[in-house]
Image: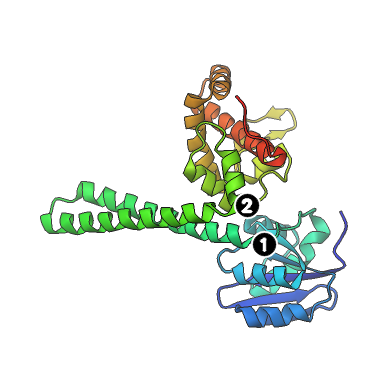
Amino acid sequence: MTLPAFRVGCDVAKAWLDFFEAATGKASRVPNDADAIAAFLNRLPREATVVFEATAPHDLGLRRALDRAGLRSLRVNPSRARDFARAAGFLAKTDVIDARMLARLPEALDMPEAPPFDPEREALAALNRRRDQLVETRAVERGRLADEHDKVLRKSLESHIAWLDRAILAIEAKIETQLAQPALAARAALLASIGGVGRVTIVTLLALLPELGQRSPKTIAAIAGLAPINRDSGTLRGQRHITGGRRRVRRALYMAALSAIRCVERFKQFYLAIKARSGHAKIAVVAVARKLLVTLNAIIRSGEPFRA
């Protein structure tokens, strides 16, 4: 690992950003708005590397400003940063302490550079996030409707559900318009070449997994939380479990795996073999989801569609 020459830790909050420069020990607080962030970054040396936690949507302005300034950045999973903080003795938690901790993090961990800022993907991610919010709200309202017997309240719920239906259709139309952008359209067509990979899964992967096609099979599975983690100590051999990763991506791949088992003979046979060996259908579906992700990763890397 090559240690960045000039490291800057950044703790991101909704109202402001706290920076800590490892070389000078200087701490700075900057309002979380485009002009203030740009002014601060412009005074940093060009070899500076900014380390910050993934705190979307509050880190959006910082990521956009880093791209414009041409500075290298490392975007860290918050749980990973917190685990490092405890291990390094940062027991107290303040914005300034978090910024100082993030500046030290590359000393101990080998961290990949954050993917380049992609405005088209960011717009797709925002639309996808809004669709998820509307779908979740609709599911809650449908649950309330099933338990409600008062006619006035039922009418209110039905009206709200109808409005949510229209809002979801409108967002999905905007998603389709965004997917028509050339770069996204080409990747979407490759992902759709596997039977069972539907539109929601495609949008989720393009929006939330920019590393797709750029990482090894093991790494991409770990990012999605589909890599089995060992639980061994001494002579004990514990059961492997998946953990961590990007929950929304994992959910989408699980549903796609259920469809792929029905649509693609290769995935069906793989599912049946794992199910017979493990005795658990859910374990077999998760294994298919992981195999599906690894296949999609290879498809994007090669630029060649899937051939059953």
Q: Which mark is residue 117?
A: 1
Q: Amino acid at mark 2?
A: Ala
Q: Which class describes the residues within 10 Å of circle 2: few (<14), some (14-19), or many (20+)? A: few
Label 2 or label 1, whichever comes before in sequence order: 1
> Is residue 129 left or right of 24 when viewed as pictured?
left
**Residue at position x 47%, y 31% in the image:** 259
Which quarter of the picture shows residue 154? Answer: bottom left
Q: Can you say whether 257 is above or below 206 in the image?
A: above
Q: Position of residue 144 (x, y in %)?
A: 25, 51
Q: Can you say whether 25 is above or below 70 in the image?
A: below
Q: Position of residue 174 (x, y in %)?
A: 45, 57
Tell me if I can see residue 49 in this picture: yes
Tell me if I can see residue 244 in this picture: no
Q: Residue furthest left?
A: 151
**Residue at position x 59%, y 51% in the image:** 184
Which quarter of the picture shows residue 239? Answer: top right
Of 40 and 298, nearer the camera is: 298
Element type at mark 2: helix
Element type at mark 1: loop
Q: Which residue is mark 2?
A: 183
In the picture, which quadrant includes the C terminus? top right
**Residue at position x 69%, y 65% in the image:** 52
> Is residue 147 left or right of 196 when viewed as pictured?
left
Q: Which mark is residue 261?
A: none
Q: Amino acid at mark 1?
A: Phe
**Residue at position x 57%, y 53% in the image:** 207
Q: Position of residue 257 (x, y in %)?
A: 52, 32
